[in-house]
Image (tube, rainbow, N blue to C red):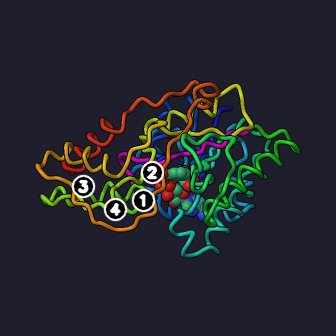
Amino acid sequence: MSSRTVFFTGGAGFIGMHVVPMLLEKGYKVRIFDNMFRGDRDKVAELVATGDVELVDQDVRYGGAVHSAMKGCSHVIHFAAVSINKSQADPHESIDINMVGNHNVFAAAADHGVERLVYASSASVYGDPKKLPMHEDDVLDPLTPYCISKRAGEDLLGFYQRRDNLSWVALRFFNVYGPGQKTTAYYTSVINHFVNRLRNGLPPVIDGKGEQSMDFIHVHDIARGTVAALEAERSNLAVNLGTGIDTSVADLAKILIDAVGVDVEPQFNPREVLVSRRAADITRAREVLGWEPTISVRDGMTDLVKQTMAS
Ligand SMILES: NC(=O)c1ccc[n+]([C@@H]2O[C@H](COP(=O)([O-])OP(=O)(O)OC[C@H]3O[C@@H](n4cnc5c(N)ncnc54)[C@H](O)[C@@H]3O)[C@@H](O)[C@H]2O)c1
């Protein structure tokens, strides 16, 4: 492989499949390291057919496998992880994959002296935010094994930076949505739920007043941010990737009603709901990555609905 090869754990997953084509466009070769637990085999096969992508069907829990497969790679993107809901049901698996897996990848990257490592952290490291927008220097309060492992990953990167000069960027993704996402995705499952009801002519049902909000960011913009982090001049810091806009569940319902084009009003289910809100401060992403979100929630959701209806 050429001198610019990206070792990409979890590269066969939802976000990875949007990043790999951008890497190829930039002239990188890509070695996907994925146990294909959730990876998309057909899409990976298409990419492998280009001759510039390899698949190593292996598990980040095995440090020896990670270390030997990384040989010859100049860059690393580390995305392999199990999700937040699985982490609550099975903390052991989550710690094994997310915590030990992180360490295996970071230790190997430090040992191979790669030029840059980009790590998928998460907005969930903040816990329930005390204020909006959420800034990278705010107090972190990770609440589940998944979130705890994401935060620990950021701290471990600091260790390998100090010990071995590893150059890294940790991206705190907010609520990523877009084509190719599994319908079970934790935060964004509300999109599917609403769209499925609307397609059957039924109104979305909202618990409470629908004030709970998320910062929905399109996967295309997340992929652009990931590539920018691989090449940014500044490194060794965490960077939020979101739109900076909090979209309430009630707003989301309205956007999806318009997108599906049905004449219904959302139904409100009067209930006590714990209202949590999210919005990223993206000043640092602008400064460090020269990055700006390009797809509004309304446009991104409308496209997604069109694609879902066509399939
Ligand atoms: N999607 C979001 O909204 C979101 C938000 C914040 C952070 N993130 C983080 O971004 C990264 C990518 O997320 P995604 O939505 O593409 O997830 P995904 O589940 O679609 O992709 C993860 C990939 O990792 C692979 N994988 C899982 N366990 C593995 C193991 N033990 N060894 C090797 N590979 C393994 C899976 O097969 C899959 O291809 C993850 O680290 C996730 O925690 C995602």
Q: Which mark lies nearer to you, 2 or 4? A: 4
Which type of secondary structure does the marked residue at label 2 adopt? Answer: loop
Would you say 86 lies left or right of 179 here? Answer: right
Name the residue beneath numbered marker 3.
195
Q: Are marks 1 and 2 in contact (CB under 8 Å)?
A: yes
Mark 3 to mark 2 CA distance (whole Å)? 20 Å
Question: Of the numbered discs in the image, which one, if any, rests on residue 208?
Answer: 4
Name the residue beneath numbered marker 1.
185
Q: Are marks 2 and 4 in contact (CB under 8 Å)?
A: no
User: Is residue 230 shown above or below 32?
Assistant: above
Q: Nearer the viewer, residue 208 or 4?
A: 208
The total of numbered circles placed on residues is 4
Q: Nearer the viewer, residue 18 or 229?
A: 229
User: Is residue 128 shown above or below 75?
Assistant: below
Would you say 222 lies left or right of 105 here? Answer: left
Mark 4 to mark 3 CA distance (whole Å)? 19 Å
Q: Which mark lies nearer to you, 1 or 2? A: 1
Q: Who comes first in sequence, dot 4 or dot 1?
A: 1
Any atom of ligand 1 within 8 Å of the CB at mark 2? yes
Any atom of ligand 1 within 8 Å of the CB at mark 1? yes
| Kind of residue indicated by mark 1 | Ala
Q: Nearer the viewer, residue 119 or 260?
A: 260
Picture coordinates of residue 5, whole percent (x, y): 63, 37
Residue found at the far right of this picture: 163
Q: Which mark lies nearer to you, 4 or 3? A: 4
| Kind of residue indicated by mark 4 | Gly
Mark 2 to mark 4 CA distance (whole Å)? 31 Å
Q: Who comes first in sequence, dot 2 or dot 4?
A: 2
| Kind of residue indicated by mark 3 | Val
Picture coordinates of residue 198, whole percent (x, y): 18, 56
Mark 4 to mark 1 CA distance (whole Å)? 22 Å
